[in-house]
Image (cartoon, grey):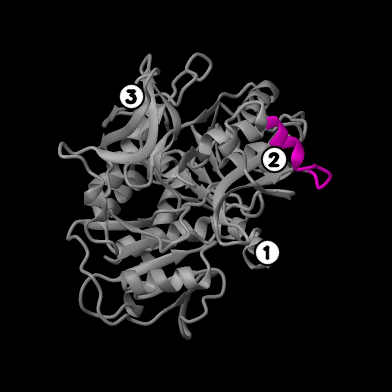
Amino acid sequence: MLIEVIDDAARRHGDRPAVSDRQTTLTYRELIRSSAVWADTLAGLLPGGDRGRIGIRAGNGVAYVVAYLAALRCGAVPFLIDRVSGVQETAAIREDCGLDLLVHDSPAPGWGTPRGELGTLTVTGAPSAGRAALDPQTEVCRFTSGSTGRPHCIEFRGQAVHRAAVNWATGTGLDADDSIACFASLSNGLAFNTSLLSAFLVGARLHLPNGLPSGSAVGRAVAACAATRLVGFPALYDSLVRRPVTDGSFGRLRMAISSAAPLDPGTKHRFVEATGVPLRNYFGAAEAGPLTFATDPLTDLGLGGPLPGVLLRAGTRANPGPVEVRSESMGTRYLNAPGLLESRMTDDGYYRTGDRGYLADGSLFLSGRSHRVINVGGRKIDATEVVEALRAAAGVRDAVVLQVLDRHGVPALAAVLAADDSLDPSGPRRFLADRLAPYKIPSLVRVVPEIPRGSAGKPAMAALEGLFAVDRTDG
């Protein structure tokens, strides 16, 4: 149903600009024509049999959107893969999901000889032997992010994708006068749910800047497309507040949106103070779509109330509890992990998000992640609590807390701090000693210029764990 919904929107919006990047702008009419041409190319490369499965692993841009629509148009299922996925991770996705083709803009070792081109994108692939059947109504597949294991492939019915877009547009007031500057990867829910189909439904313009989101680059992109909405991960806003916003780039901007990782309150305050633009850190889940939105972030200090089509339940301020959700945009299942998504559902159809929090005055407040609980020596430690304390220490810009093995092979609490290399790690540890129980103070600390993160803004845990490898091997 998705391509029918998109075609209907295109007929209504015709010659309005639909999508652009630094090099190209397509109207709605041109977008549909281009996707039809590319759909013919893809159809000729797909093997016969059941529905084709096309992985898309590319950076944001007009070509990405055209390839996505082309995959839908030729009757295939697009699998949206994070562009920063490594060789092993991409190979695991191919094996787990039985992909036929990969559309990509960077090398794809192990995929064989390129079989075609779609503009600036390359099409590579060979059919996989044996694969799990898709749900008959699946139209799009996306992947969970932030895990060091094999990504879970979430199947989405077309109706779920459509309802996510409709409910986001309705709940946030998105309309045809909006222009969205989106710096988040389209493979991630932050962009997929807030900036792709939702923009097309109402006739808005979607602008997809390329390159690193430095403060100056963001300003130029916002000005170039006269953006009314800015979408990006927390790191984008951290970059923006490091430079004065004085060039008038943000004159038409009415809303900034962040998600996927915690947004530092100091960053939020400085951004709003500098631009006058409300910055909203909405709550969503990969498996359930966008869930909350703060209509007035000046008075709503939480993550907002439920969007249309969403039901929430959680604990109380005095007793935070598991956050559970029902939405019209729920995923159907994990293609490569049968039964796992179903096991995370309650008997009455709510998805257990893994977050803990509470509802107050109609708004959701998060207090931590249940799976972020670290067990060291029989002591349970909420990593979120320790991270928040470390971020308040002098000289610390950012922090991640994790469990590693020390040089004796014993589990230990560790921290990676983003700070200048002159920072003495004993300072933050002394700071924690006055605030937290002794067992919550990391025994191993590394200082880095910036926390390594994936394209979704979440910490790259494998890289962080590697910083402590010396402690595991040093006799």
Location of residue 212 in the rendering, given as x and y in whole percent from the top left corner: 66, 52
User: Hey, what amino acid is under mark 2?
Assistant: Ser
Q: Amino acid at mark 1?
A: Val
Report x, y in % for residue 428. 71, 36
Quadrant of the image occupied by residue 149:
bottom left
Element at label 1: helix
For label 2, the residue is 239
**Which residue range is magenta in the image?**
420-431
Q: CA distance from mark 3 to mark 2?
A: 34 Å
Q: Is residue 430 magenta?
A: yes
Q: Earlier in the sequence, mark 3 or mark 2?
A: 2
Residue placed farthest to the bottom in the image?
Answer: 113
Crowdedness near tag 2: few (<14), some (14–19) or many (≥20) residues, C-alpha within 10 Å: some
Whether the residues at callouts 3 and 1 have beta carbons within 8 Å, the answer is: no
- Under circle 3, the secondary element is loop
Residue tagged by mark 1? 470
